[in-house]
Image (cartoon, rainbow, N blue to C red):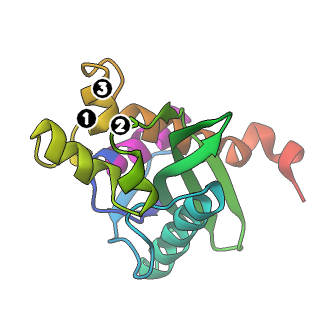
Amino acid sequence: MIVAAGTKNPNKIKAVKDAYRLFGFPAEVVPVGRPAGTPPQPVGLEEVVKGAVARAKAALEAVPGAEHGVGVEAGAVHAGGAHLDITVAAIADRGGAVTLGFGPAFQIPTAFLPDVLKGVELGELAERYFKKPSVGYREGIIGVLTGRRVTRYQLNLAAVAMALVPRLPKNAKLYRT
């Protein structure tokens, strides 16, 4: 199965490949850059979901032989009086169906929050603060905050795996519309 991933980030590409493999779908993942018009730091759940869906659909369009397009987007959401960074995955197919999955979320450091809410990418802020270049392409800010006990790859993997749940053959009757 050919899967187009709306990213060039190695963390996200590996998460897509591993999530498909987790459920027994051998996937050849073809990376495609982020579509124009998607903000680097979406704020609000609808914007994060919109970004993931836009990535998935653009990736699917860009790779003619792909069965699925996958978009993975992280962004800031407000819930329970806190601002969280959440990862959302969207999987689009040629029939027009889109399935969604969410990964674990963590509280955004208050030191970064004002800039994040202005649209500055959390990874960029982490790179400057922790003096770790390309942190978003490695362990992510969550990896830095947790001493690599939890990494960005794991958040991405969880989100993509959850987006695959409705697509599992054993669940076909449950999710049929």
- Marks 1,2: beta carbons within 8 A: yes
Q: Position of residue 76 (x, y in %)?
A: 51, 50
The residue that label 3 is drawn on is 145
Q: Is residue 161 above or below residue 124?
A: above
First-in-chain label (3 vs 1): 1
Mark 1: secondary structure:
loop
The span picked out in magenta is: 12-24
Q: Residue at x 36, y 23 (%)?
A: 150
Question: 1 or 90, which is in the foreground?
Answer: 90
Mark 3: secondary structure:
helix
Q: Nearer the viewer, mark 3 or mark 1?
A: 3
**Magenta span: chief secondary structure:** helix
Question: 18 or 42, which is in the foreground?
Answer: 42
The residue that label 2 is drawn on is 153
Q: Position of residue 47 (x, y in %)?
A: 59, 64
Q: Position of residue 134 (x, y in %)?
A: 16, 49
- Marks 3,2: beta carbons within 8 A: no
| Residue type for callout 3 | Leu
Q: Residue at x 87, y 54 (%)?
A: 176
User: Label 3: few (<14), some or many (≥20) within 10 Å?
Assistant: some
| Residue type for callout 2 | Tyr
The residue that label 1 is drawn on is 139
Residue 164 is at least partly visible in this image: yes
Direction from residue 34 to residue 97 in the image, left or right = right
Cα distance, mark 1 to mark 2? 7 Å
